[in-house]
Image: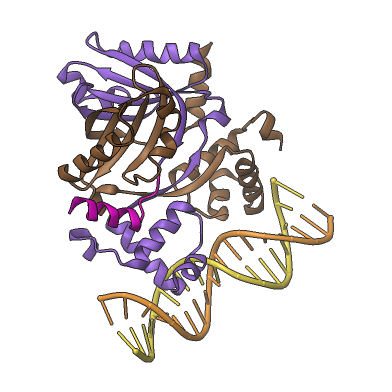
Chain colours: A purple, B brown, C yellow, D orange
Amino acid sequence: MAYVSKPELDTRDWQLLEALQQDARQGYAELGRQVGLSAPAVAERIRRLEEAGVIAGYRAVVDPKRLGFSIDAMVRLRCDGGVCARIGALVADVPEVLECRRLAGEDSALLHVVALSVAHLEAVLDRLLKIHPSVSTTTLVVLQTPHANRPLTRAMWQAAHAMEG
Amino acid sequence: MAYVSKPELDTRDWQLLEALQQDARQGYAELGRQVGLSAPAVAERIRRLEEAGVIAGYRAVVDPKRLGFSIDAMVRLRCDGGVCARIGALVADVPEVLECRRLAGEDSALLHVVALSVAHLEAVLDRLLKIHPSVSTTTLVVLQTPHANRPLTRAMWQAAHAMEG
DNA sequence: GTTGAAAGGTTGACAAA
DNA sequence: TTTGTCAACCTTTCAAC
């Protein structure tokens, strides 16, 4: 509960966070070995990190390419205010949209889309355009992804605070 | 090994993939209950999915907001070809960049950046501009994220193949 | 893929720092 | 309040089928 109002993570909390971001399927005993705690102590710390919302869940990372989704694109979306306010709900039934963010600025929203082929990408884009007449898109095909879902580490947290001044 | 050349997933493989994307810390016995298999059979299927690269890993999902990173921005980057070819390496030591993709199209790259404050975001952007004189940025602040890292499901795979024709 | 047995991990209650 | 210890229970793992 202490975390909810003001998360103050100590060295071991950070070590556990980093270990779980690297491999979420490690057991408590194994984690305890890495941070120098007993398994029950590890379990209790992780339970608190989960309760505080610092850890939002644990996910298997699946590679879309290995499932046949050879195309990866970012779609910049512009649309009327009313449409964009509901963009999350409007793309909910387009499963090729893996990520959807509403933005402040030049573009109204940004989508991360996967597709089986160029023909399939075309079909997905057509479907997005049919959401509303005001919708227009700019599609950028991803050539490579040098960094994806980088971990949040203590080093990064400290560097950020030092930078902020 | 069969998966490497041509991943053909059956119903149970997909069920396991979906279950692990929902909660990667479930045990083999629990997964077995869900898909109607014994624990060793589940372990063997998961081992093959990992070996085939379909499952790339297991990660704890950490909420940057709960760690103080209250700002979430997408940064569109334009730069000279030589610089953008090495963009991954060039932003490797900027830990606030959680994602980095090289793109074909109007923008050369797209970064997902987190920051503690507007002042910190400014500092990060200054650092990105200092990578090379040819670099210019357009920053779009994320207002909300209706969908993040949606799971790849069998339903989606089938819908995509139906759509492709 | 299943079964069964050995090894080891998890989880609770309780004691101690 | 947080961690460690202990014991009961469950899971994982590997062999044989």
Tell me which secondary structure the magenta stretch mostly adopts. helix
On the image, the x and y values in percent for residue B33 come to: 55, 50
User: B107 left or right of D9?
Assistant: left
Q: Residue A1: in sight, yes or no?
A: no
On the image, the x and y values in percent for residue A73 come to: 41, 22
Q: Nearer the viewer, residue A136 or A151?
A: A151
User: A7 left or right of A142?
Assistant: left
On the image, the x and y values in percent for residue A165 come to: 17, 54
For the record, the magenta segment spans: A150-165
Residue A47: say if magenta: no
Judged from this view, the residue extending furthest toward the front is B133
Q: Quadrant of residue B120?
A: top left
Residue placed at 25% from the left, 35% from the top? B73
Q: Nearer the viewer, residue B101 or B8?
A: B101
Residue A158: say if magenta: yes
Q: Nearer the viewer, residue D14 or A73?
A: A73
Judged from this view, the residue extending furthest toward the top is A133
B25 lies above or below B2: below
On the image, the x and y values in percent for residue B20 come to: 49, 45
Q: Residue B110: in sight, yes or no?
A: yes
Residue placed at 23% from the left, 30% from the top? B139
Q: Quadrant of the N terminus of chain A?
A: bottom left
User: A53 left or right of C4?
Assistant: left
Total labels: the figure holds: 0
